[in-house]
Amino acid sequence: MGILRLSHVEVRCPDLELSTAYYTEVMGLIETAVEDEAVYLKGWDEQQHHSLILRYAPTYGVERVGFKVQHAEDLDELTSAIEGYGIATKRFAAGELGPGSGETVRFVAPSGHTIELVHGMEQIGNALPLHNPPPEPQGLSGMHPPRIDHVFLMCEDVDEITRFYTEVLGFRLTEQIVADDGHQLATFLERTHTAHDIAFIVGPDAAFHHVAYWVDDWNDLRRSADIAAYHGVRIDAGPTRHGATRGWGLYFFDPAGNRNEVYTGGYWADPDREPITWTEAQMGRAVFYYEGVVDQNFLTVHS
């Protein structure tokens, strides 16, 4: 019941043609629809219409983040909880927000980000048969991650946004980085029993850090780094390991300046699992376990 997982992320791009070429040829996502000022894409193994929207805008950044809910009734219950928190919502019919879109509730979270809860996005399949399928379709390009994994955002008050996501939206806290004064510097939250579906770190409200796509193992991560280097894509960090989430990641930038990650590993998070706490002194190891430090450039604001 309630929120199932991350559904989609919309990012801003000043050059749609260049960004589309990058996301289809280098990242290897599949284009599913095109509008005058937007392009819709998905990972090859995603059944739903899209998980990434490229929206024309003068600069980079995140426009909105969507989560999939299991039942239409969940939209009513979550709307009531959000409005009870004092946040206004707006409802859209299926198809009203563009190709493939489902019935949607939209609101602005305390972090300043525009969030959507979606039920009934069009299902278009993964191009594999339901009987005796091969491991993946033939002819995939670039890194070709199977699915979206998580989104990492920034805001001024991590304590408040964590309370909102846990108490109102029903997320579970898996890990946190806590400052010496007791405030949360970063939190990792899940609905899928993975290490995180969304995370927040201290920074300006409504700011964007990265969107991550899943790859199956370390070899796929290493191969993604080879592809990024071959295409001249600017690598930001990695391949490396995280202390928080225990995952492995590679960070790089799309042509607009939006940070991407390909991610793998992590752990299974049962609902009764106690959160892991990292201290401020160990923040570097929490983010980059091998290096033990966080370069200030890695905390660059993408708003």
Image (cartoon, helix red, strand yellow):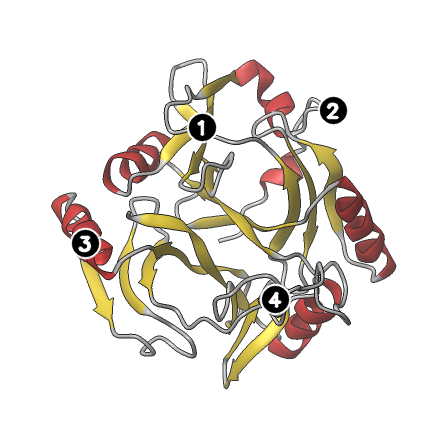
Mark 4–mark 1 Cα distance, whole angstroms, equals 37 Å
Residue in view at x 39 percent, y 45 percent: 205
Neighbourhood count class around disc 4 (C-alpha, 10 Å): few under 14, some 14–19, many 20 upward = few
- Asked if one can make out residue 202 in the rendered structure from this viewpoint, the answer is no
Q: Which of the two discs, 2 and 3, labels the residue nearer the N terminus?
A: 3
Q: Indicate the amino acid at tag 4.
A: His
Q: What element carries label 3?
A: helix
Mark 4–mark 2 Cα distance, whole angstroms, equals 43 Å
Neighbourhood count class around disc 1 (C-alpha, 10 Å): few under 14, some 14–19, many 20 upward = many
Q: Indicate the amino acid at tag 3.
A: Thr
Q: Is mark 2 on a helix, strand or loop?
A: loop
From the image, tell me which residue sits under label 4: 131
Instruction: Give how far across and how far down residue 178 sits, in percent.
Output: 45, 20
Point out which mark residue 174 bears. 1
Q: Which of the two discs, 1 and 3, labels the residue nearer the N terminus?
A: 3
Residue in view at x 45 percent, y 13 percent: 180
Mark 1–mark 3 Cα distance, whole angstroms, equals 25 Å
Q: Is residue 75 left or right of residue 236?
A: left
Neighbourhood count class around disc 3 (C-alpha, 10 Å): few under 14, some 14–19, many 20 upward = many
- Residue nearest the viewer, comparing 205 with 211: 211
From the image, tell me which residue sits under label 3: 79
From the image, tell me which residue sits under label 2: 290
Residue in view at x 52 percent, y 17 percent: 280
